[in-house]
Image: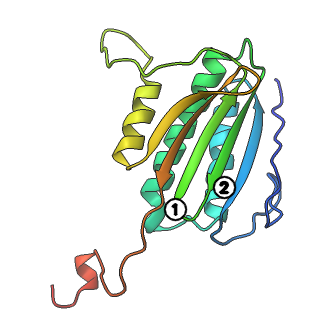
Amino acid sequence: MEQTEWTAAADATGWWPGREPQPGPGAGVWRFSAVSNEASVPRTRHAVRDRLLAQGMAGQRYQELVDDLLLIVSELVSNAVTHAAVLSPEVVCELAIDPDRVRIAVIDRHPYRPKAQENDPARPGGRGLLLVKSVTLQAGGECDVERTADGGKVIWASLPLPRPAAAGAGTDPDDDPDY
């Protein structure tokens, strides 16, 4: 069985895959490289999840965002290892967090620029990018496919971070004693 090698660019907290993450919210950019095979899909998803949680995106406020990002990364890495592996023996997942947004991107060396397919129940598969686009737009984000300098492509989705709730404005009826 082929082993996947993980690499990541160090961030300000000194976190690396396999090392205990430093908790706390914060911005940064992290890259996860993996061999183009099916085992890389859950491994990349888990690396992204661990990084999001290490950056302080745990709890109810971030749950929907984290779920959306994990679905997106699963679809994008799955597409890359299914369709680009012949020309791209490695895929790279990049996670970028800034004060307002989270951007997830998957980079491969295959020149083909995929497009979201129409929802055709008679055709199995082919709906991954349609799902990514739908989830991204529903979350108020944007997504696109771009060429890389080496002739490959990067497929990315950028989602807004949830805004903090106003002080004293609970959304749960159990939080309001007058409800």
How many C-alpha atoms fall within 10 Å of the one at disc 1: few (<14), some, or many (≥20)?
Answer: few
Residue 151 image point, x, y percent = 72, 19
| Labelled disc at residue 100 | 1
Q: Is residue 115 above or below residue 45?
A: above
Seen at 44% across and 17% down, the residue is 125
In the picture, measured across the screen, residue 80 lies left or right of residue 10, that is left
In the image, 153 versus 8, the foreground residue is 153
Q: Amino acid at mark 2?
A: Asp
The residue that disc 2 covers is 50
Seen at 57% across and 39% down, the residue is 73
Say whether disc 2 or disc 1 marks the residue closer to the N-terminus: 2
Residue 64 image point, x, y percent = 42, 55
Secondary element type, mark 1: loop
In the image, 54 versus 11, the foreground residue is 11
Secondary element type, mark 2: helix
Residue 131 lies in quadrant: top left
Q: Amino acid at mark 1?
A: Asp
Label 2, label 1: how far apart the Cα atoms are: 20 Å
